[in-house]
């Protein structure tokens, strides 16, 4: 009874902990939102994290199974990043197939920000896993590397074939601009007739 009446006890501690975790979550989301337009700096930070992870695995000489799992996960993310939101194989062609078709921008199944965030989280988790010996399963790493390379080549071959078949590119080559119609009689002469 004293814990309930005095305001102290397990329930108030749990409430305080819950409030603190919500504050930390809000602060994290605030900085995550502020980083959204700065894609170059986000990717530089992620490549620094990847380098740190690679150095850790190299110097420890282990955790190859963790790295293999990380590679499979990143390959899965890459497929989502390179694929259109609506699959033309299932829903029919929604991407323009001729020059006369209406321009529709390429919309990814996995947007760039979510792609970056998932990769960064994955490397953070993998980096933390390298501090626990139970994840260091002894394997012959060249076999894992060869198997991952075969999976990568087969997956990318299938993805590129899909891109060619449905005529889409998962990269933006710049913003399309309207050039307007040229008048019929104005090829290269000036308007004054010089």
Image (cartoon, rainbow, N blue to C red):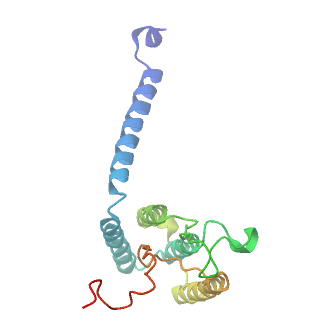
Q: Where is 63 relative to 154, above or below?
A: above
Front residue of this view, candidates 78 and 91: 91
Q: Where is 172 relative to 42, above or below?
A: below
Front residue of this view, candidates 57 and 21: 21
Quadrant of the rendered structure where residue 104 is? bottom right
Q: Residue furthest left?
A: 194
Query: Which residue shows up at 43% across the image and 81% down it?
Result: 182
Image coordinates of residue 69 in percent, x first then y, are: 55, 72
Quadrant of the rendered structure where residue 117 is? bottom left
Front residue of this view, candidates 102 and 23: 102
Front residue of this view, candidates 7 and 179: 179
Image coordinates of residue 125 in percent, x first then y, are: 45, 61
Quadrant of the rendered structure where residue 101 is? bottom right
Picture quarter with the C terminus: bottom left
Image coordinates of residue 35 in percent, x first then y, are: 33, 57
In this picture, residue 148 sits left or right of residue 133: right
Image coordinates of residue 33 in percent, x first then y, are: 37, 51
In this picture, residue 85 sits left or right of residue 171: right
């Amino acid at each position: 009874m004293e814990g309930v009446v005095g305001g102290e006890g397990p329930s108030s501690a749990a409430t305080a902990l819950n409030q603190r975790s919500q504050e930390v979550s809000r602060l994290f989301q605030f900085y995550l939102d502020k980083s959204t337009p700065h894609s170059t700096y986000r990717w530089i930070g992620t490549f620094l994290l990847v380098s740190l992870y690679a150095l850790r695995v190299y110097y420890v000489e282990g955790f190859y199974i963790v790295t293999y799992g990380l590679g499979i996960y990143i390959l899965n993310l890459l497929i989502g990043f390179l694929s259109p939101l609506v699959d033309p194989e299932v829903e029919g062609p929604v991407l323009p197939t001729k020059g006369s078709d209406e321009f529709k921008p390429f919309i990814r199944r996995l947007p760039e920000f979510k792609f970056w965030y998932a990769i960064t989280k994955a490397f953070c988790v993998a980096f933390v896993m390298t501090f626990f010996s139970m994840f260091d399963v002894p394997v012959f790493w060249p076999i894992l590397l060869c198997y991952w390379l075969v999976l990568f080549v087969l997956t990318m071959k299938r993805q590129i074939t899909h891109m060619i078949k449905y005529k889409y590119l998962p990269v933006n080559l710049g913003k399309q601009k309207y050039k307007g119609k040229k008048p019929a009689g104005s090829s290269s002469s000036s308007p004054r007739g010089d």
